Amino acid sequence: MEAEALIALAERVLAPTYRRPPVLFTHGEGMYVYDANGRRYLDFVAGIAVCALGHADPGVAQVVAEQARRLVHLSNLYHTEPHLHLAEALVAHSFADRVFFCNSGAEAAEAALKFARKFARLRFGPHKTGFVAFTHSFHGRTMGALSVTEKPAYREPFAPLVPGVTFVPFNDVEAARAAITEETCAVIVEPIQGEGGVNVATPAFLRALRARCDEVGALLIFDEVQCGLGRTGTLWAYEAYGVEPDLLTVAKPLANGLPIGAVLMREAVAAALQPGDHGSTFAGGPLVTAVALHVFRRLCDPTFLAHVREVGEYLMARLQALALPGVKEIRGRGLLVGIEIEGDARAVVAAALERGLLITTAGDTVVRLVPPLIVERAHIDEALGILEDAMRAALPARSSHA
């Protein structure tokens, strides 16, 4: 079928939960993707911070092909080699002692919330059930994850949600200390918020959360679904803070596009669990975990992480130096960057697409840049040239960022 016919087909057969542009993509290579008409686009979305190694990576493709010829699925009723080696690697390169595999970031959040409730019940009794989360948070769209996601537009159509959640202003130490009480079983926070606007937690804030959780016996959950696995220039975002969680959720880039999530946890949390407490038919299958192990080993490479830090610093410096119209603030770390503007971020995204650049939003007024971690300086120069033109076309004339 022609591209136009396929796009029309989407209008008839897909649930209307996404607003997609009328473009049909067919393939990609490295930093670029191509549409059905052969037009090339520079990708600074990376499948929403997923394709850390870019598109059609030869190493990933080789692992997929080799494992697909051996074993794709068996279920969690049995052991397979890839998921054991991946769990071993995740433990060896983190604070954690144990791993639970799932299929997405939202599933990881659901599991972490369940594990926290079970731990609190066994350790303290059935009264300790509360969660504390933060303004501008995003943890997923399933019912539990949505319950700790603050944005009203996401929550209200599906209320009532899981009760017992208190929202506190992000980076407000005193408000957080007051909200975290003896009734709190867990605090869930993104060290760097992605969907909520690319907001960076202060060291004092995360240190205060750790200290207060220890005081009242609450667990600290870090959501690193978007900011983890090298995107900020360290393997885990928490490393830059010197603060460790009790549980951590990870997903997006772990298998470079194949669906996988995981919850990393301390032994004390794992000790509260028993067979039947949680499960997943597809999670941790041999195909996806073989790919994830390959990806994870590459993301752990100190040289690779140094590259992310170097190009991330270059991206931020270039953005700060540009006279972009209507910019209020540029923030982020590594290759997770948000540009807050005086205007509609979706208009900038649309203008960039017309000019051959894929970018996305992080709220109504924030343009988000999350390129594959293999990005080079030349790609950044190309992207910012397009972005500057797109912003001038999409936004009214305003004073420039200083």
Image (tube, rainbow, N blue to C red):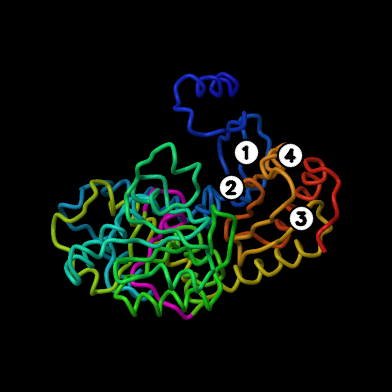
Nearest the viewer among 384 and 341 is 341
Q: Which residue is mark 4?
A: 351
**Of the residues under marks 4 and 1, which one precedes in the sequence?**
1
Q: Which residue is mark 3?
A: 327
Secondary element at image label 3: strand
Task: State if disc 1 and disc 3 touch (CB < 8 Å).
Answer: no
Q: Which residue is mark 1?
A: 34
Q: Which is closer to the viewer, label 4 or label 1? A: 4
The amino acid type found where label 3 is placed reads Val
**Of the residues under marks 2 and 4, which one precedes in the sequence?**
2
| Dominant SS type (magenta) | loop
**What is the x, y in percent for residue 172?**
53, 69
Range of magenta residues: 242-260
Nearest the viewer among 214 and 255 is 214
The amino acid type found where label 1 is placed reads Tyr
The amino acid type found where label 4 is placed reads Ala
Residue at x 62% of width, y 28% of height = 22
Task: State if disc 2 and disc 3 touch (CB < 8 Å).
Answer: no
Q: Which residue is mark 2?
A: 29
Task: State if disc 2 and disc 1 touch (CB < 8 Å).
Answer: yes
